[in-house]
Amino acid sequence: MSVAAQSIGDQVVIDPALVRLDFPIFETWESERKFHYLDNAATTHKPTRVIDALTHSYTQCYGPIHRGLYPLAEQATSNFESARRTLQQFIGATSPEELVFTKSATEAINMVASGWLKPRLHSGDVVWVSRMEHHSNYLPWQRVCKERQAELRIIELTEDGQLDLSGTPELFADNTKLIAVSHISNVLGIENPVAALCSAAREQGIPVLIDAAQSVSHLDLDVAEMGCDFLAFSAHKMFGPTGIGLLYGREERLSGMEPLLVGGGMVDRVGEDSAASQWSGIPARFEAGSPDMPGAVAFAAAADYLVSLNRESVRRHVASLTQLAARGLMTIPGVSLLPHAQLPRNGIVSFTHRELHPHDLAQVAGERGVAIRAGHHCAQPLLSYLGHSATARASFSVYNDEADVQALIEAIMSAQEMFGG
Amino acid sequence: MMAQGVYKEKLLEHYRQPMNRCDGAIEAADAIERGSNPRCGDEVEVGIFLSEGGLDKVQFRGRGCAVCIASASMMTEAVTGMRVDQALRLCEQMHTWFDAQDDAATFTLPESLQALGAVREHPARRKCVLLSWEALAAAIAGAAA
């Protein structure tokens, strides 16, 4: 266990001040004042052990994987596959073969849309997504539905921002071929009841893909408990390197999936015509080209880091800061939270101001050392539905503390003062 | 409170009390063009009123952030009275100025636009500054067509 996580009574509690010491970016940016980084839903910073894992791979153990017959290459291969096993345990998968390294969560979802769903999708079939999806869990399904003359349908939201499952009885109809929903909305911060959804879908034999990009850094993911067929997330949102992600697929699903990319490393036999070519088994079939071994090793180091902080304590810490921020923002006249109801939010709080544009809120906050996001957050269907073109968004992580929340509140009040004249 | 960073006092003045802004539709213009930024939902409509090859009057309406509204307001003041070719030239120069990564560009902002200067340090605000200028250029092109 990390020294930043300490047992107090029967609970483990993380100390964000100690956590910050693990992240060199703060030392770099805090020469004059505290850096309040509240854009963790976009990307997280990297602890030293992740940076060290990358450096170690390049300086001590770098070679081609899955093909070299000399010790260095064999060690590189071993490290790559060891990273896969670490991540397997991290998400509770049955076997390492169920994990495919991708370049991002986006690529993972596209792989399922093109490689698994497309060959099975026909005119009259339906694919369901929710109203709150990120474009990366919307556009791949929209495209494949158009290509196959199938229908993309939307699980709408209740007034308090929850998935309206009871208002969508057709969700589990015979012609539903796949359901794709996010675990946590990247705009609303609302956690969806994915285990219940997967359980109901499974009774009807309908596969479910979960976009875990916004939950992986602070919820304890367990694909067995969740019961999903596919799960996608990226490393960079959970303290890992940029440029690598993961697709989990249940073995029987992946076995029936076509590769998105073909080329080196994914084929056992190449024939004169395509029918004679034989793809490798899973997961190699989906990892054409030279895989990102250093990235995978650092990805696993990030998972180890999260485990060392105690994932339950991470969950409590992030949820507590999010609620504190939501309560604080609601006290500022003119500020509205999305959605309006006081719901449990996980890591993310989006808000608007009656008079001030989100760009101006974020700019003023930035000038005060508070990093927040403004825009549509790649969720235009949701924002249009809610009647907004942009919001401001603050998102929290292990290195944030109450002073960051206070700085956020003060920054918004300062913007109000500045534009009020 | 003192204006800081991007928000120079002059910029805030234009935001709070924009020049040549219409609350309703722009009426009787020789050409009207709209620009929008789907990333933040900003929309600006620019109408031009021509007289003997020059911009007799320029109006705008729309919604946007402080930078977007202030830039539109300053634009209307800066180009009113210019010949259309001069105004088009200034539109191009605004792009060149914003995109220049160093000060090698020969163009410097005229005095009336100096308050936009600090925004160039923030590439994400490019569209906020240039939206109304692009709409102006499109309106001039539309009037000539």
Image: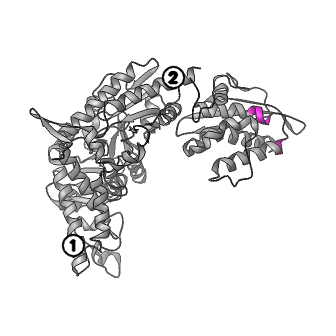
Q: Chain of mark 1?
A: A
Q: Is residue B55 left or right of residue A70?
A: right
Magenta part of the chain: B76-85
Q: Of the residues shown, which amino acid type is indicated by label 2? A: Gln
Residue drawn at 28 percent across, 48 percent down: A22
> A143 or A349: nearer the eye?
A349
Q: Secondary structure at mark 1?
A: helix
Q: Is residue B73 left or right of residue A329?
A: right
Residue under label 2: A416
Q: Main secondary structure of the magenta part?
A: helix
Whole-number angstrom distance, CA of label 1 to CA of label 2: 57 Å
Crowding at label 1, few (<14), some or many (≥20) Cα neighbours within 10 Å? some
Q: Residue B59: percent from the left, percent from the top?
A: 74, 29
Q: Earlier in the sequence, mark 1 or mark 2?
A: 1
Residue A173 falls inside the magenta stretch: no
Residue B81 falls inside the magenta stretch: yes
Please identify the quarter of the rendering in which residue A61 is found: bottom left
Is B60 above or below relative to B140?
above
Is A115 above or below relative to A239?
below
Residue under label 1: A75
